[in-house]
Amino acid sequence: MDCDRIDSILESYGYDHSAIISIMQDVQGIENYIPEEALRYISEKMELNLARIFDIATFYKAFSLEPRGRHTIKLCCGTACHLGGAAQNLDQLKRTLRIEEGGTTEDRLFSLETVNCLGTCALAPVVVVEEDYYDSVKPGSLGKILSTYSSDSED
Amino acid sequence: MSISRTRYDAVNRIFCDAIKDEAVKIPIIIDNRMVQIEQGTFIIEAAKKADIVIPTLCYHEAIKPYGACRLCMVEVVQNRQRRLVTSCNFPVEPGMEIFTDTPGVRKIRKTIVELLLARCPGVSLLQTMARQMGIDRPRLKKRNDKECILCGLCVRFCEESVGVGAIGLSNRGTDREVATPFKVASDVCIGCGSCTYICPTGCIEMLPDEKTPCLRSMKMEGHSCPSCSNNYQCDSCATDQEFLVEMRRVVSEFRNLAEKAPS
């Protein structure tokens, strides 16, 4: 855990209790998840109840207390994407990455999530890796998408 | 529902006269009875002053209102508009007329009790409430066998009155539950046992623990209140007053101990 970086995040928000969600988002940005020690550290430094922070961390789906992969894959399972074959894409992803929904690969490169609608139904079926949107995804094209991210990290 | 013009004018006139008499307090009408009450007090307090009992599960005088159980719903008529509000956290304002026992209010309360009973079928307090409200057979299937109604009393009491905050609510939706952070034994709990007392359904149990044995000196026998239909919040409730005094003693004792031996 990087105490100095957390300190600088806390400093930038002026230890403001009302900014706790933004602070936690920034802390999550360091390692892509919030380690237990980090939560305890924030609670101590901000003089905020740990139970309260734990409530926020478990309430919002955006926060993860479990380690997550470097790249988060969001697979849309909304109506349009479902009709376009999102289920097949999901099966293919599960097979290639050997993980379940919400899981993380052993090398901590990818996390797989399903979402209910991304609001880009015209692009169905959609897969989002980090911030990049991929439209009209077919099970066959998933390998190519994943390989760009796998090779990225090797550099 | 709209209120007739003449009735509105009549009520308004009464209010205007009453405001002249009293500078600090404002008059409100609860169930056709006039009560003088300071502006900003919550409806439930005003009702108590008028000897009207509003059923509730998540309200306690000693802590801030939360509005979780929705059982204290009342109808408020203001500016010729009628609406349903939770009386525990709705402050009174001049020109307000409150109805605590209309068919609409009764229906809502009944539904809430039915829902709570479906969640926690084994809780005697809810069974009593259901009987009082005339629910013979719950329409809803008993889906859970939980005892916690998520009123948040224990969490808020621990944080506000005891000043510790050892437990909190976590997760959301159907997974929401009261738990310690990371679901491990809390290192800040002083073992005062107020959560076991304050819990309206009696779902928190006190177990002997080697870590904090000397501090658990609160008299707890018969103090748990699952059988009180009014959640021990009547003015005359001696048990509650006794408990608050005892709780303060235990907390201050703990604070003194902590000051003497800084770790």
Image (cartoon, rainbow, N blue to C red):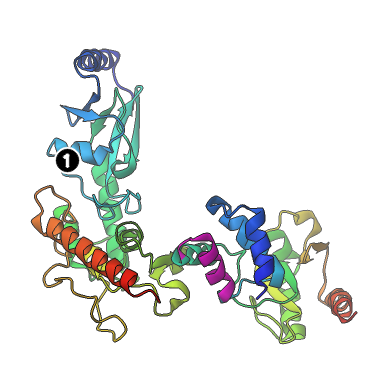
Quadrant in the rendering for residue A3: bottom right
Q: Chain of mark 1?
A: B
Disc 1 crowd rating (10 Å Cα; few below 14, some 14-19, many 20+) is some
Please, which residue is most extreme toward the front here?
A: B260
Residue sitting nearer the eye, B207 or B43: B207
Residue sitting nearer the eye, B138 or B109: B109
Instruction: Inspect this view and state whether residue A62 appears.
Output: yes
Residue located at (67% from left, 73% from top): A2
Please determine whether, in this image, residue B99 is positioned above or below residue B134.
above
Q: Is residue B105 left or right of residue A1?
A: left
Q: Is residue A41 magenta?
A: yes
Residue located at (25% from left, 61% from top): B138
Residue located at (24% from left, 71% from top): B193
Position in image of residue B149 (x %, y %):
32, 63
Please determine whether, in this image, residue B130 is positioned above or below residue B214.
above
Q: Quadrant of the N terminus of chain B?
A: top left
Please determine whether, in this image, residue A46 is positioned above or below residue A3.
above
Query: Where does label 1 land, which residue?
Result: B48
Quadrant in the rendering for residue A134: bottom right
In the image, the segment drawn in magenta is A37-49
Position in image of residue A87 (x %, y %):
70, 73
Q: Is residue B181 left or right of residue A9?
A: left
Position in image of residue A102 (x %, y %):
63, 75
Q: Is residue B48 magenta?
A: no
